[in-house]
Structure formats: C-alpha cells, structure tokens
Image: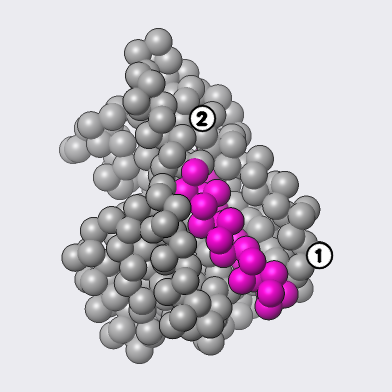
Amino acid sequence: MLRSLDGEVALVTGASRGIGRAVALRLARQGADLVVSGRTKEDLDSLANEAEKMRKKTLVVPGDATKEQDVKKTVQMAKDAYGKVDILVNNVGIGSYKPFAETTVEEYDAMINSNVKSTYLFTRFVVPLMIERHYGQIITISSGSGHAGYAGEAVYCGTKFAEMGLMESLDRELLPHNIKVSTVSPGGVNTFFAFGAGRTKGDPSLQDMLNPDDVAEAVNFVAAQPWKSMVTEITLRPASEPRY
C-alpha cells in the first residue's frame, strides 16, 4: 500500500510542462507540497494554481537548471520556505536524434549541460539538506536510452548512461544517510521533447508512445513506497516499442 506524502516537500525540476508538470501534480495528489523549477514562469504559475486547488502549497522558482547560481537560489528558497526538501525529482533533459557524424559540438554541449549537469547541480545542493535531516529521496528521470545504445542518438544515450552511473554510485554512497536513490527510465513519451531535433509535431507514431501521466504514476509509485521498501529502478516503455 502506498503511503501518503502529507507533510513532505517535493522539488521537481523541468516542471513547466510535459513529464515534470505531470509528476508535480501527481505528487501533490499524493499529499506533497511542492517546489517547482523551470524556465517559463507562466507555465509554473499555472501548475501552482492547479496544485493549490488541492490545497497544497507550491513555491514557484523560475530558473535555468544548468546554471549553478539559479540552482543554489532554488534550493535556498526551498529551505527558507519549508526548512527541507524530502523528495528531489531530476527531470530536466533534451534530446537530439541524428547520426553521430552530423551531431554538432553545440548540440553535444547542450545535451551534456541539460541532461547531466542539471542533474549533478540539483542533486549536489539538495543532498546536504537531506544528510542533515538523515532523510530523503532522489528520483531521476533517465531513459531506456540509458540502458542500451541506439543508432542515431549516440550522444543522447551517452548522457543517459552518465545519469544512470551517477545515481547508482549515489545509491551506495547515500544509503547510510537514510537517503533513497532511484531512477525511472521511460521509453518514448509523447511530449514536446526533441521537437525540431529528431521528432516532428503531429507524427502519428507519437500516439503509440507513453503519456506524461504514465511516467508520473511510476514516479509516485517510487516516492510513496513504505519507507522500509525501496524501488531502485522502474523501466517502462510503450507496449508497441521493442525492448532493445
């Protein structure tokens, strides 16, 4: 039986839309108060209005998850408002699908910063709060591409393998501090993700993909486990998608 998250605070990155928005609202329905971060304040305010209809407090902190000062500001504001962060959901990420020889250095840098650096930064500055309280959960949205390399997305796969390695190491390092570390690795999800960089809006294949709410349910299942139970990883994919 899943536990209530009443009294807990969840910080969700990339919460403006897509998976991040769905995750934040699902955790609010489970009882969590929220800190939501993203680049578009209007979208974050809309999310906050939805959460507040559930009588859940929501702190909106717009910012760039790849910039150290923006991340520090978000975590400090969470601490000032709530005194803690119980659940961190690392969700920020971008993709670019094309042959390796056509992938530019600029695209490489953008994926490394968005997919790896943002996860490092938020985790780096939230972990001390969790260690201090001897309590917390870190849930990172990775990808099926963090388990198998695929042609046409070598750099993207590389960033997701990096996320998986980081989380696996932190699982071992943070367990003595009563901090759970988990990953949720979806296959294709029908969001704005990678539009113009390998995906085309209106492509019929998008309809066979997972929806953001499917991923949000998986994240909630991880977050709301009884505390003595730990889901290390969930891998989910569309039923129409081959395993590898």
- Give how far across and how far down residue 232 sits, in percent: 68, 55
- Name the residue tied to disc 2: 157
Which quarter of the picture shows residue 114?
top left
Image quadrant containing the C terminus? top right
Q: Residue at x 23, y 64 (%)?
A: 41
Residue 6 versus residue 126 in the image, above or below: below
Residue 128 versus residue 171 in the image, above or below: below
Mark 2, secondary structure of its residue: helix
In front of the other: 187 or 89: 89
- Give how far across and how far down residue 89 sits, in percent: 50, 61
Q: In the displayed structure, does residue 139 sit left or right of residue 108? A: right
Amino acid under label 2?
A: Cys
The residue carrying pointer 2 sits among few (fewer than 14), some (14 to 19) or many (20 or more) residues within 10 Å by Cα, namely many
Give, as a single range, the part of the protein colored magenta.
Answer: 117-144
Residue furthest to the top in view is: 101
Residue 16 versus residue 55 in the image, above or below: above
The residue carrying pointer 1 sits among few (fewer than 14), some (14 to 19) or many (20 or more) residues within 10 Å by Cα, namely few
Q: Residue at x 72, y 54 (%)?
A: 171
Q: Is residue 188 visible?
A: no
Tell me the distance, in whole angstroms, between the alpha carbons under discs 1 and 2: 30 Å
Mark 1, secondary structure of its residue: helix
Q: Which mark is residue 176?
A: 1
